Amino acid sequence: GMRRAIEAAAVMLPAPEPLPIVGLGVEIDDAEPTDMARTMHVPPAARPVFDQPPVPEEPTRSGFRLSLPPRASLVPWVVATVVAIALASAAFAVTQATKPSVHVPNLVGGDVDAAGSQAGKAGLLVEVARRIQAADPAGTVVGQDPPPGESMTKGSEVSLVISTGPPPVALPNVVAQASDAATKTLQDAGFEVAVDERFHDTVEAGRVVNQTPQPGKAPEGSTVRLVVSKGPRPVVVPNVVNLTSDEAGAVLIEAGFEPVVSTEYSDTVDKGHVIRQNPVSGQEAIPGSQLTLVVSKGPNTVRVPDVRGMSVEDATGALRFEGLEADIVNYEPKAKVKRQDPSPKTSVRRGTTVTLFL
């Protein structure tokens, strides 16, 4: 192996000068001298010397001349490098062997962020090896290597396979459909549905305003969000009580309502003016909705007709036509009315009884 190769080379060479070993008595900047990813620094003593000028020979005491080598050989430098690498490799192996082992947790089923957090607590790292289409939602871990329970050196990486979501399927267009019908259409196509109701000035209440994602294709089982109209936003009803019927109608139309008028008698509100309204002022109502106005016909009174000289039958009919009752004194069929009370043209409440004297 490597040792035999080094020994064979050493036999052929003169003994090299002592080498300072990195980390033994030498101050260095590298905090991890055995890290193989870093650049190796060869000590000055191990560096080869090239093209040195010849050293003059000098006589010795014995009379013989001692010849120094004309140039340093490359072999000692190579041997020194191999030795340094071998020592560093051994140190690295020892360091790795002393790192604690941990059991790989089960990361499948959670999302990729949760997997990273779980692995980190166990002392491991994660890397996304690949992404595939799967029934699981996008971002879900669907595979891991090594599998759960296997022993790994602390700080190692677990490779993950991540879902990109199910394959896309046809997503129908449900805009303008009634909310219930749109929901059923999407559910039948394999989607979940979430409904968000909002006011809308032009789309009828209960119908779909828009959908997200847009029609086309989307992952099967994914959620489609529908915005459904609640109709126009309610507004505060104005007060039109005591205005004339025409004035009240103009105010309500300006506010976006449709006035509907009915009438009734009133002893307190002048004829043609609004007695009351429904909804009342201050309440909220949807623009475009109907608002009922009750308009006064004035006091519920009539003028008593002049029935003197009429037959009792004709006089009774004339009073009833005006909403009045008849009380007859000295009744005889077809007898003429001689006097009446109240007298003609008197203003009385409708339903009042008029006494006829025959």
Image (cartoon, grey):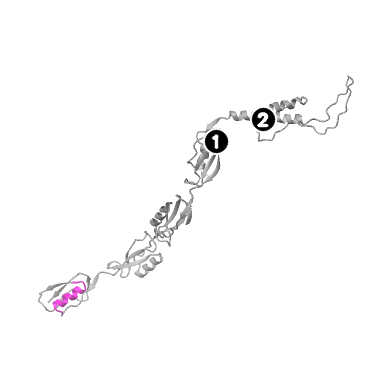
Q: Percent x, y for residue 92?
A: 63, 30
Residue 311 among magenta residues? yes
Q: Quadrant of the N terminus?
A: top right
Q: Percent x, y for residue 11?
A: 75, 24
Residue at x-position 55% and y-position 42%: 128
The answer for how far apart the CA atoms under marks 1 and 2 are is 25 Å
Q: Is residue 325 above or below residue 15?
A: below
Residue 44 visible in the snapshot? no
Q: Which mark is residue 88?
A: 2
Q: Is residue 117 left or right of residue 301?
A: right
Residue 171 among magenta residues? no
Of badges 1 and 2, nearer the viewer stands 2
- Residue 267 or 217: which is nearer the viewer? 217
In the picture as drawn, the residue positioned furthest to the bottom comes out as 309
Residue 2 visible in the snapshot? yes
Res 287 → quadrant: bottom left
